[in-house]
Every structure is written in C-alpha cells, then in structure tokens.
Amino acid sequence: MPCFAIVVAECLALRDGLAYDVHNGWSKKMIEGDSMLIIHCVNPAASIPRSIRLLVHDIILVRSLFEDVAFKKV
C-alpha cells in the first residue's frame, strides 16, 4: 500500500472537492486521479483498506448527491 499519509491526503482532497462541487450546485462530474487504490475503493464492491475506510465512506456518501459522477484513472 502507498504511503498512508499520501493516501489519506488524496482521500481528503477528493471528499472536500466533491463537497465543494455539491455546495455550488454542480450535478455532473468526471473525476480523474492517479491513485488506482482510491479509484477502486470508491467504486462498488471494492475491498477498502481499513486505514481509509471512513474517508471512502464519506466520499461515497457525497458521490450519491450527484446526478452523474464518474471516476477515471489517468
């Protein structure tokens, strides 16, 4: 697993960015990221590492507020 602090920082950035977009009324979003771990975790039926489980659940909750959102590895 990549460095714990980096993964947590990327999860926080994703969660906060999605929350910002919801707050500003955006309903459709394409998220591009370079962390395959996080991209897999936010998709259904993925195994989520214990160290980021709560953050990923927050991301999934905020994701549900969008009309359409997609996550892509770049």
Image (cartoon, helix red, strand yellow):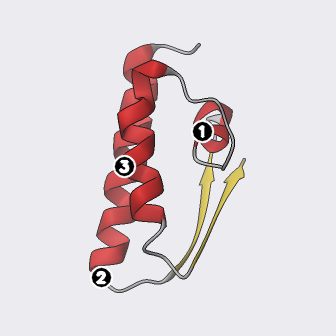
Question: x, y percentage for residue 3?
Answer: 48, 13
Q: Which residue is mark 1?
A: 41
Tag 1: Cα neighbours inside 10 Å, few (<14), some, or many (≥20)? many
Q: CA distance from mark 2 to mark 3?
A: 18 Å
Q: Are marks 3 and 1 in contact (CB under 8 Å)?
A: no
Q: Is residue 20 above or below residue 11?
A: below
Mark 1 vs mark 2: give the one in front.
1
Question: x, y percentage for residue 18?
Answer: 40, 63
Tell me the SS state at disc 3.
helix
Is 74 situated left or right of 17 in this image?
A: right
The amino acid at mark 2 is Asn
Q: CA distance from mark 1 to mark 2?
A: 25 Å
Q: Quadrant of residue 1?
A: top right
Is 36 situated left or right of 17 in this image?
A: right
Q: Is residue 52 above or below residue 34?
A: above
Disc with the residue nearer the chain's start (1 vs 2): 2
The amino acid at mark 3 is Asp
Question: x, y percentage for residue 63?
Answer: 47, 64
Tell me the SS state at disc 1.
helix
Residue found at x 63% / y 43%: 39
The amino acid at mark 1 is Cys
Q: CA distance from mark 3 to mark 1?
A: 12 Å
Observer-nearest residue: 20 or 54?
A: 54
Disc with the residue nearer the chain's start (3 vs 1): 1
Disc with the residue nearer the chain's start (2 vs 3): 2
Which label sits on residue 24?
2
Q: Which residue is mark 3?
A: 58
Residue found at x 56% / y 29%: 48
Which label sits on residue 15?
none
